[in-house]
Image (cartoon, rainbow, N blue to C red):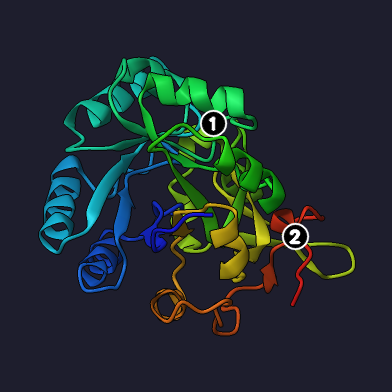
Amino acid sequence: MSTRPMKLAVGPVLYLWDRRVALDFYAALCEAPVDIVYLGEVVCSKRRLLHKEDWATVAGALAAAGKEVVYSTLALIEAESELATMARIIDRAPALFEANDMAAVQHAAGRAFVAGPHLNIYNAATLHWMAAQGARRWAAPVELPLATLAELGAARPDGLEIEVFAYGRLPLAFSARCFTARAHNRPKDECGFICGDFPDGITLYSREDQPFLTLNGIQTQSAAVQAATDLEALRAAGVDILRLSPQSQGFAAVVAAYRAALDSNAAVATLPAAALPGGYCDGYLRGEAGISHAG
């Protein structure tokens, strides 16, 4: 069990938001009760509404507000140009960066980094190998149950932090195809950035009219929102950091709810009603079907 107070992290924005909306979001985070903020594009290299000058300005403002800033990298790299962009992001990162592809780990060449949730780390041997490459923090894959996390937490290398995807639509898969463009009969290379019309992705429904998945460009997400609210179980598993994934609706209230629970050392966090279709889920954490919810 970790004896340190758990920290709150805000993950990278996984959707394409309007530039002004994104800048306002990060400006608000300067005053928000969070400890860590991840910046950058993880899903699609074509999404460039924020330029490198914007990212530098945002990072500076967050750092001045006392937040730890981590630059994230793409989860699916398909071209030499994307490799070059990844290298530039890593090289200009002020401290830690998040590696979501093994190419980023290789480029780091021993530099300290966060092993992102899209790396395939499922056992202690891999975790120790990744730490030997420079990993100082591990953001666990979203499908790992807390029982496995507890085992890996007990066997982790000294000094390695464990982070859990505590809130947000679960990132399930990536593809070379753009599902959002395809849904609108557009080729991927001529998408017109149609994903920008859907600030929380496109919810897919089953034939029984139940929310099932979410389309977000080349990424497939859950329709339900992960809600890891059993803080006592998370502490017992050795979790150091809770990652909250941004959404366009009700996010400030979610941050406030987690902060209040952590500050009061509560056993369970009480979250506001789910703002997105699909409701809440926590099945993966309990070793069950991911879509299920204990509550």
Q: Earlier in the sequence, mark 2 or mark 1?
A: 1
Percent coordinates x, y for residue 23 in the rendering: 23, 62
At x 12%, y 59%, the residue is: 61
In the picture, measured across the screen, residue 41 lies left or right of residue 220, that is left
Vertical arrangement, residue 3 with respect to residue 189, above or below? below
Q: Residue furthest right?
A: 208
Vertical arrangement, residue 23 with respect to residue 41, above or below? below
Q: Is disc 2 in contact with disc 1, using a CB cutoff of under 8 Å? A: no
In the picture, measured across the screen, residue 110 lies left or right of residue 16, that is left
At x 76%, y 61%, the residue is: 291
Q: Secondary structure at mark 2?
A: loop
Task: Tell me the number on the disc at residue 283.
Answer: 2
At x 24%, y 49%, the residue is: 69
* Quadrant containing the N terminus in the rendered view: bottom right
User: How would you rate the neighbour count of disc 1 (Cα within 10 Å): few for under 14, some for 14-19, many for 20 or more?
Assistant: some
- Inspect this view and state whether residue 228 appears: no
| Circle count | 2
At x 54%, y 61%, the residue is: 235
Tag 1 residue: 119
Alpha carbon of mark 2 to alpha carbon of mark 1: how far?
A: 21 Å
